[in-house]
Image (cartoon, grey):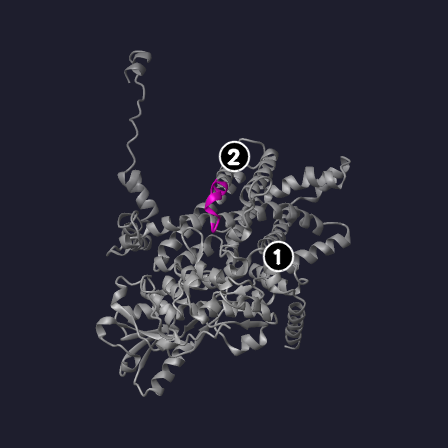
């Protein structure tokens, strides 16, 4: 135990001394000429190699936007598939410049593990799925229902908390694995099935008729997913934060991949003019040029376009926007003012 | 009959044996074989019937899933349209990434050429068109050639190693691992037998700690812990770290395998070699090793097969080898729900390769000599 503690302390010292003496990531990325992005080994919709060997996904596009803003080319990227054990240490040790891999923003990771979170790109959380023919439209209507759930996870706990808080009588039917629980649900053993919304969506695509199941809008737990960067390089953290913020703002102001150049030329709106570098020099605040956000939007589109490309109604996953709508539509996406 | 009668003197009766009666029907042919092998005794009969029943239950559905009801053409919709068979379209769609990973499309001919070179080398070894010494040389040159084709340089565009993956990566890690770890293992084994205590201690000090930990630990150390200790900015390529880990691990095991062979050499051989005036290296190379290695061919082949399968552990350090790519492919949002096809295909390919290696090992054993 003693030696274990010593080892941990030594590791931390190493990690801290290592991180302190890094050069600036921005300079490093520019010198290398490419951005190293830590991704998953395959999470549907978020990051996945497609059939032609190209990395695609929601998390990947966030990284591509940063590459476009910093290097001017969204293809100047190197991908490092990371397991969930590696995802923190890979970025804190400088192996990758950004980890964009479905990572929940928690206090412990942020404060103790040598990483900084940037911008919540996806509010995931536990949700419910029911057969569409049941007519249920809200999780509050699940009184007296049986719900299939995996055992020993926070999922089970969240379900119980939700039921108690809303005074519902929900009977949990517990299974060992996610697949077993889902199969039990599809075979009619339960009235509803619960796990994280993004996983509900990918499980739904595996049934014969995905349209026969709906995901309810309620989200009953907090899994805010955010890209992370190394702790202590504030300039780099700012860049990642503001590029993603810019993508969210672009959706708010109706700037899309297609019309960005046209809007840049024609707009009279001072907010958009500042954003797109027509007036002022907000890019300069970050150590970038004036066209930083224009390039990012040209490369991957605004937040809404990215969302729709990977989770929207045109995809197999069809995850409802839910909390990931703009603040004006009742969601949580709130772009900080770019000025 | 008439001929014997004609040669016998007239009037003499010669004994004429009757022709053999055929053996009873129950002991020859199909029936006899069945009786001897499947139905000798009531419990064997019972077992046979039970197993037959099981096969009847299992085999036809398996075949109809894998072959008759399977979907071979079309898109994903062809698979989901009320069909119970396997969806090989999925494997076909993912075939490229399963074989070569993210390797860029414009350079795809290079891994294909490397693959052909590899198959040719394997064929040359299997049919023994060259002597053993030439084969070793061919393999070294051929592997270097494959590496050059895949990696680039010297006139070819360099393809970054983060783009490598699939079966190509698995085979590459295994082939290089085997080729380096066998000589290294032999050296370690000889070192362990050495008269010089420093060398002996050094070799034991290398072999025992490495053999004492699982491969997964070594890979994890190499990939996750090492970056923390390395000086700032120094970056050793992840793949190289993993390859070195695999080589060290395999060499430690090879050393123990070879040591088994060395122990089997009777002391008289050493004495005989000495009395002929051979020095240490001549004794080792000309007398000891040829016999020792012959003894350990089965275990060496065994290690090679294990090494090839162990490469699938690199998924824990984020390299998308054949198995890793299979698992990633399953997660494609456009192709969710075809786990069975992907794993069956993956298992089949692993089986073909490992089984070929084991057959090759058998033929080496039978041939005995020219190892």
Give yes or no for residue B108 being in the magenta stretch: yes
Q: Quadrant of residue A8?
A: bottom right
Q: Which residue is mark 2?
A: B124
Q: Residue at x 30, y 85 (%)?
A: A169
Q: Quadrant of residue A110?
A: bottom right
Give yes or no for residue A262 being in the magenta stretch: no
Does residue B363 lie above or below A87 as drawn? above
Q: Report the span colored magenta.
A: B101-112
| Residue A185 horizontal/vertical position (percent) | 29, 71
Does residue A338 lie above or below B94 as drawn? below
For this rendering, which residue is in front, A50 or A11?
A: A50
Q: Residue at x 30, y 18 (%)?
A: B13
Numbered-mark total: 2
| Residue A315 horizontal/vertical position (percent) | 33, 61
Q: Which residue is mark 1?
A: A31
Q: Chain of mark 1?
A: A
| SS of the residue under disc 1 | helix
Which mark's residue is nearer the viewer, 2 or 1? 1
Q: Are marks 2 and 1 on the same chain?
A: no
For this rendering, which residue is in front, B109 or A237?
A: A237
Q: Residue at x 54, y 65 (%)?
A: A98
Q: Chain of mark 2?
A: B
Check whether the beta carbons of the residues at disc 2 and disc 1 lie within 8 A of each other: no
Does residue A30 lie above or below B131 as drawn? below
For this rendering, which residue is in front, A65 or B81?
A: A65
């Amino acid at each position: 135990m003693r030696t274990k503690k010593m080892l941990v302390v030594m590791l931390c010292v190493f990690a801290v001394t290592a991180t302190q003496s890094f050069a600036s990531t921005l300079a490093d990325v520019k010198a290398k000429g490419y951005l190293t992005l830590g991704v998953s080994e395959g999470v549907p919709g978020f990051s996945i190699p497609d059939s032609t060997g190209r990395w695609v996904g929601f998390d990947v596009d966030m990284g591509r936007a940063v590459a476009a803003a910093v290097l001017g080319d969204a293809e100047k990227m190197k991908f490092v598939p990371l397991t969930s054990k590696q995802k923190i240490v890979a970025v804190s040790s400088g192996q990758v410049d950004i980890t964009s891999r479905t990572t929940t923003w928690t206090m412990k990771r942020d404060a103790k593990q040598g990483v900084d979170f940037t911008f919540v790109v996806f509010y995931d959380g536990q949700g419910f799925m029911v057969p569409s023919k049941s007519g249920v439209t809200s999780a509050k209507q699940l009184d007296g229902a049986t719900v299939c759930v995996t055992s020993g996870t926070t999922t089970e706990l969240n379900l119980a908390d939700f039921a108690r808080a809303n005074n519902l009588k929900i009977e949990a039917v517990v299974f060992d694995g996610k697949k077993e629980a889902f199969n039990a649900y599809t075979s009619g053993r339960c009235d509803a099935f619960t796990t994280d919304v993004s996983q509900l969506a990918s499980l739904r695509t595996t049934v014969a008729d995905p349209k026969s199941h709906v995901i309810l809008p309620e989200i009953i737990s907090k899994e805010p997913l955010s890209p992370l960067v190394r702790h202590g390089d504030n300039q780099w953290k700012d860049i990642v934060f503001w590029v993603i913020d810019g993508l969210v703002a672009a959706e708010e102001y109706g700037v899309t991949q297609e019309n960005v150049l046209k809007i840049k030329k024609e707009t009279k709106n001072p907010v958009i003019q500042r954003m797109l570098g027509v007036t002022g020099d907000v890019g300069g605040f970050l150590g970038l040029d004036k066209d930083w956000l224009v390039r990012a939007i040209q490369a991957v589109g605004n937040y809404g376009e990215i969302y729709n490309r990977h989770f929207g109604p045109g995809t197999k996953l069809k995850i409802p926007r839910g909390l990931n709508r703009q603040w004006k539509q009742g969601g949580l996406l709130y772009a900080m003012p770019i000025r | 009959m008439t001929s014997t009668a004609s040669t016998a003197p007239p009037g003499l009766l010669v004994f004429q044996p009757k022709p053999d009666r055929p053996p009873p029907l129950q002991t020859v042919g199909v029936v006899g074989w069945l009786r001897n092998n499947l139905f000798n005794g009531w419990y064997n009969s019972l077992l046979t019937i039970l197993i037959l029943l099981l096969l009847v239950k299992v085999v036809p559905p398996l075949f109809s899933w894998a072959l008759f009801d399977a979907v071979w053409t079309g898109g994903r919709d062809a698979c989901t349209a009320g069909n119970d068979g396997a969806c090989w379209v999925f494997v076909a769609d993912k075939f490229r990434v399963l074989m070569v990973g993210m390797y860029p499309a414009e350079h795809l001919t290079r891994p294909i050429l490397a693959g052909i070179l590899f198959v040719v080398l394997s064929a040359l070894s299997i049919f023994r068109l060259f002597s053993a010494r030439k084969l070793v040389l061919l393999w070294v040159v051929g592997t270097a050639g494959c590496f050059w084709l895949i990696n680039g340089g010297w006139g070819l565009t360099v393809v970054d190693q983060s783009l490598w993956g699939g079966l190509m990566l698995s085979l590459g890690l295994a082939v290089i691992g085997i080729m380096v770890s066998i000589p290294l293992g032999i050296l370690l084994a000889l070192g362990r037998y050495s008269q010089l205590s420093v060398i002996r201690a050094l070799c034991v000090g290398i072999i025992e700690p490495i053999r004492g930990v699982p491969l997964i630990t070594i890979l994890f150390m190499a990939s996750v812990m090492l970056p923390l200790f390395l000086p700032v900015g120094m970056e050793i390529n992840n793949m190289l770290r993993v390859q070195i880990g695999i080589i060290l691990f395999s060499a430690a095991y090879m050393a123990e395998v070879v040591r088994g062979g060395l122990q089997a050499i009777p002391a008289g051989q050493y004495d005989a070699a000495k009395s002929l005036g051979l020095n240490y290296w001549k004794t080792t190379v000309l007398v000891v090793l040829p016999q020792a290695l012959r003894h350990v061919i089965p275990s060496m082949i065994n290690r090679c097969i294990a090494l090839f399968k162990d490469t699938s552990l690199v998924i824990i350090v984020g390299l998308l080898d054949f198995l890793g790519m299979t698992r990633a492919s399953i997660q494609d949002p456009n192709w969710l729900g075809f786990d069975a096809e992907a794993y069956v295909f993956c298992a089949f390919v692993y089986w073909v390769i490992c089984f070929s290696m084991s057959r090759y090992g058998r033929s080496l054993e039978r041939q005995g000599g020219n190892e």
